[in-house]
Image (cartoon, grey):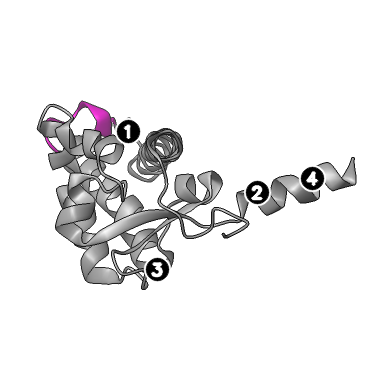
């Protein structure tokens, strides 16, 4: 039997915590970026610029930012900031690296897991491989990326 969790399917609590960190980070960075852009434009144009009062642009920009926030790091390293903090990563269902195409598909279909009354997310609890609807469609799985038990043993050994 393996001594750690590395490579084992991540459960709903870990995945939810990582997703929560990602959502908070996404919103905070977007707000900071928007405020900086408004300030720079106000200085350059010499009159107040309030991008947040536009009708469509803030929403379109937010969704584009959210797509980039999730898709780029998943394609590049298999994990977002929240996933790195939570000690998980996304791989193909066969355990290989995720790749760009699967990362993009996974991010594009992620809302589908929530839109179906949460059924797509409930699959994480129901299925033995802990794959949500967006994982099934993209051919991905979320696994632990660090040896949790070994880390705990090393921590306790120092005490």
Asked if labels 3 and 1 touch by Cβ distance under 8 angstroms, the answer is no
Asked if labels 2 and 1 touch by Cβ distance under 8 angstroms, the answer is no
Q: Which residue is mark 2?
A: 149
The number of discs equals: 4
Residue occupying image coordinates x 36% and y 68%: 95
Label 2 and label 3: CA atoms lie apart by 27 Å
Q: Is residue 97 above or below residue 27?
A: below
Crowding at dot 4, Cα within 10 Å, few <14 / some 14-19 / many 20+, comes out as: few
Along the viewing direction, whichever of 116 and 60 lies nearer the viewer: 116
Please state if 130 lies on the left or on the right of 118 as rendered. right
Crowding at dot 1, Cα within 10 Å, few <14 / some 14-19 / many 20+, comes out as: few
Please state if 138 lies on the left or on the right of 156 as rendered. left
Which structural element holds mark 1? loop
Label 4 and label 2: CA atoms lie apart by 10 Å
Asked if labels 1 and 4 touch by Cβ distance under 8 angstroms, the answer is no
Q: Which residue is mark 4?
A: 155
- Which label sits in the foreground, 4 or 1? 4
Along the viewing direction, whichever of 84 and 56 lies nearer the viewer: 84
Residue 75 drawn in magenta: no
Q: What is the span of residues highlighted in magenta in the rendered image? A: 50-56
Residue occupying image coordinates x 27% and y 60%: 140
Q: Which residue is mark 1?
A: 47
Q: Which image quarter holds the N terminus?
A: bottom right
Task: Check the image and name the residue furthest to the right.
Answer: 159
In terms of sequence position, does the residue under pointer 2 or pointer 3 come before the other?
Answer: 3
In terms of sequence position, does the residue under pointer 1 or pointer 3 come before the other?
Answer: 1
- Which label sits in the foreground, 3 or 4? 4
Q: Which residue is mark 3?
A: 76
**Residue 153 image position (x, y, % from top left):** 76, 48
Label 1 and label 2: CA atoms lie apart by 58 Å
Label 3 and label 4: CA atoms lie apart by 31 Å
> Would you identify the image quadrant in which residue 91 lies?
bottom left
């Amino acid at each position: 039997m393996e001594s750690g969790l590395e490579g084992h399917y991540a459960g709903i609590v870990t995945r939810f915590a990582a997703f929560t960190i990602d959502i908070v980070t996404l919103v905070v960075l977007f707000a900071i970026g928007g405020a900086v852009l408004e300030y720079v434009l106000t200085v350059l144009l010499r009159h107040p610029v309030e991008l947040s009062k536009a009708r469509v642009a803030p929403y379109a920009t937010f969704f584009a930012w959210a797509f980039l926030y999730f898709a780029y790091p998943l394609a590049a390293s298999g994990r977002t900031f929240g996933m790195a903090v939570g000690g998980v990563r996304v791989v193909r269902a066969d355990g290989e690296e995720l790749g760009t195409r699967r990362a993009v598909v996974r991010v594009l279909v992620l809302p589908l897991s929530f839109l179906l009354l949460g059924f797509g997310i409930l699959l994480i609890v129901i299925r033995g491989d802990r794959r949500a609807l967006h994982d099934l469609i993209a051919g991905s799985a979320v696994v632990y990326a660090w040896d949790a038990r070994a880390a705990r043993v090393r921590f306790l050994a120092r005490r």
